Image (tube, rainbow, N blue to C red):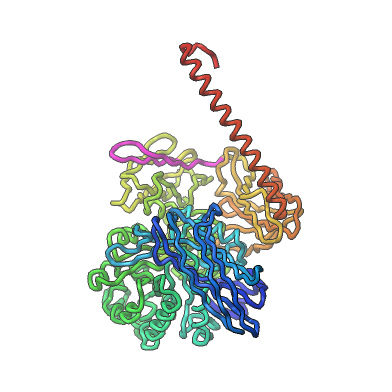
Amino acid sequence: YNSAQPNTRWYTGSGIYRPVWLYTGGSVRIPVDGVRIQTPDASNEISRVVVETILDNDEGQSRKVTLKTRIQNRAGECVSQEKTTVSLYGHEKKTVRQVLYIRNATLWSVEEPSLYQCGSEVRSDGGVLDSADTTFGIRRLELDPMHGLRVNGSTVLLRGACIHQDHGILGTASFKKAERRKVRLLKEAGFNAIRISHHSATKALLEACDELGMLVLDEVFDVWNHCKTQYDYSLRFAKNWERDIEDLVRKDFNHPSVFMYSYGNEIQELATISGAWWCRAMAEKIRELDATRFVTNSINGLAALEEHNGQIAADMGILPQEVVDRVMEGTYDGDINELMTVLHGAMNQMATHPMIDEAMCEAYSCLDACGLNYMRDCYELYAKQHPNRITFGSETLPPDIALNWEKVKAIPSCIGDFTWTGWDYIGESGIGIVQYGEEDTFFKPYPAYLAYVGDLDITGFRRPISYYREIVFGLRKKPYLAVQNPENFGRKENKTPWTCSDLIAGWTWPGQEGKPCKVEIYSPSEEVELRLNGRSLGRYPTGAKNRYKAELEVCYEAGILEAVAYDSGEEGETVCLCTAGEQSRLKVECDTEVLQAGEQDLAYLAISVVDENGVTRAEREASVAVKVNGAAVLFGLGSANPVSEENFYDTTRTTFHGMAQAVIRSAKESGQVEVLVEAEGCESVVLKLETVSEGQDEKRKMKIGEMRKEEMQKGALQEVREELGKQEREEKGGQINE
């Protein structure tokens, strides 16, 4: 158990939590991950595709075989093929290199994630000895301090999210549906890149990034030889690092979404001779294995110079003298995170101290781009002092996104920003929770168990910071409203630098009438007008000049709170929050009606308590019970509440801000599924689902296709009738009644 032998700062899972596959093959075969595909020349006119296939002959005698490689586009059309004769000695493993050309290729990009399928067959005497199918994309990567990161010649600014490997109420159990859902929701929230922090990404996640168009910064180590937690990976690093990097590159090589490798996160020995040696050794090892992608390291200069932080803070006049003395004497009992909590975000400023650049210079020199954790103030400094150095925010504070993005857009050599984090996770408990009237601490005491720093909570629901970020990125025109519970108005907020405002998108605060509350409005417009029950409460500047935010105080009054955008005096888009009514009912939405048999498919149920008009009763926490009968099981039930003693595997759960989530897992066999959802004071809801076998699903899809075709034909016929009727009316002066 993790509690018996702690091994990291976040929840890593226990036991077998990813799929395990058994591959079978003949004595002459293509081994697992034995096909490597490169696209050194990528263009729409003609692209060169280099396919390297490993052939393994286990027989004791020589064999002559034929390797046939066939590339198909998404429509299943063959766009290029090649056939090569190969002679193999007994017990020989050989790499066969084939060059194919694709004319009028569709290039892979974030906006258009076009993929190709490479089919490899090993044939002898007219029979197939082995085969392999490999998905890949054709794209061109470039990196320089003038244009930043370019994909197919177009500059891309990385709108990045750091993510851990768990899936909320599923723990670290990895299912293809869960991985794809995470990527899809992050992309819908405005992200175009994810940083795998700090583990090896699953194949299912990388496939989802390939298919949906999400760039991947794949990171492999959180520690090297210096431990961060008792029993962590530092015990095995020196022995296993080379094999781990080889496995990472072999797994990632054919995924067009992967554009950069990171081989470290906040490594504490970087400023030492040993750390610099390891830095260069791993960078060159990766380049030896894969010269097609870039190499980075997520560096925190203050973590690497932890024993000098007191001196740095004293030099810059940041820390109180009492804390400086304790740090200098070695009597300060907090780690780097606790110190940064005391500093309240001053780490960005401290990172500009000359001692940091001097200590990190050799580590930086090993990298194609320097990943900087909480070192935003160095972007411009390094651009001036080191014109060949490319930087990006590999880990940044969520509340700082407006200032961070302003720097990214203004400095060509800074290629993007990765917030900590895009999706909330289990572990580092409570670093994003707002406490009232208590001492600032990085971690929060039991029963806090979630970090609570994600733009999306563990259920995938978007928090207010997500909409704020989307506006900063320039992807959302509509304003957004968020409100703090009036009960907390005026109370001292104790929070870490990672903490956002304690707000929700709700306007239901019974018993708080007439009391003031804090309201935040996010908008890209020049200004917004706030209205309460139809009357104006004034206009407030927003937009880029004000970092897209207006903060004000409003006395609570039940009804409708409305924000109206204004540009050049013209009224624009509007958003409003409504007070929920007295009645309560259950609202249950499921993302699918059909599950695939085989125990690998999932259905996600969004459960909320709403009023008669569908407004979420965020102020009411209700106990929700879920029962599943038939060809499926209840696999997880939870909420986004970061402080809870409830279990994900129970059949009841208390809502958080009026919401909860259930995950249903398909059975091994097909059959009908009934899901019963109950809550006190609400009428129960019954959902009907179905678990089907692969053959049944194909028939179902064909039937649905036929029905849609029939509907389209009926619709087309109706359009023709309407057009003929219109023409007839025009001919007769419009006197015919419809």
Q: Residue at x 33, y 80 (%)?
A: 360
- Which residue sits furthest left? 384
- Image label count: 0
Residue 415 occupies quadrant: bottom left
Residue 366 spot, x, y in % from top left:
35, 79
Does residue 37 lie above or below 402 as drawn?
below
**Residue 392 or residue 24, whichever sits in front:** 24
Which residues fall within the magenta stretch?
561-580
> In what quadrant of the picture does the N terminus appear?
bottom right
Residue drawn at x 60%, y 58% as measured from the top left: 177
Q: Is residue 729 above or below residue 225?
A: above
- Judging depth in this view, the residue of 587 and 641 nearest the camera is 587
Residue under the point 68% across and 50% down: 698
Say left or right for 539 vs 162.
Answer: left
In the picture, the quarter occupied by the C terminus is top right
Tell me if residue 563 is in the magenta stretch.
Answer: yes
At a point 31% along the width and 78% down the height, the residue shown is 356
Q: Is residue 281 visible?
A: yes
Above or below for 296 versus 280: above
Taking the image as shown, residue 705 lies to the left or right of residue 401, namely right
State whether the magenta stretch is mostly helix, strand or loop.
Answer: strand
Q: Nearer the viewer, residue 95 or 112?
A: 95
Between 383 and 649, the residue placed more toward the observer is 383
Q: Position of residue 603 (x, y in %)?
A: 64, 54
Residue 465 is at least partly visible in this image: no
Left or right: 27 in relation to 379: right
Q: Position of residue 269 (x, y in %)?
A: 40, 84
Looking at the image, is 334 positioned above or below residue 600? below
* Residue lying at the far front of the rendered structure: 125
From the top left corner, tell me how far across and down residue 647 is, in percent: 65, 63
Q: Is residue 462 magenta?
A: no
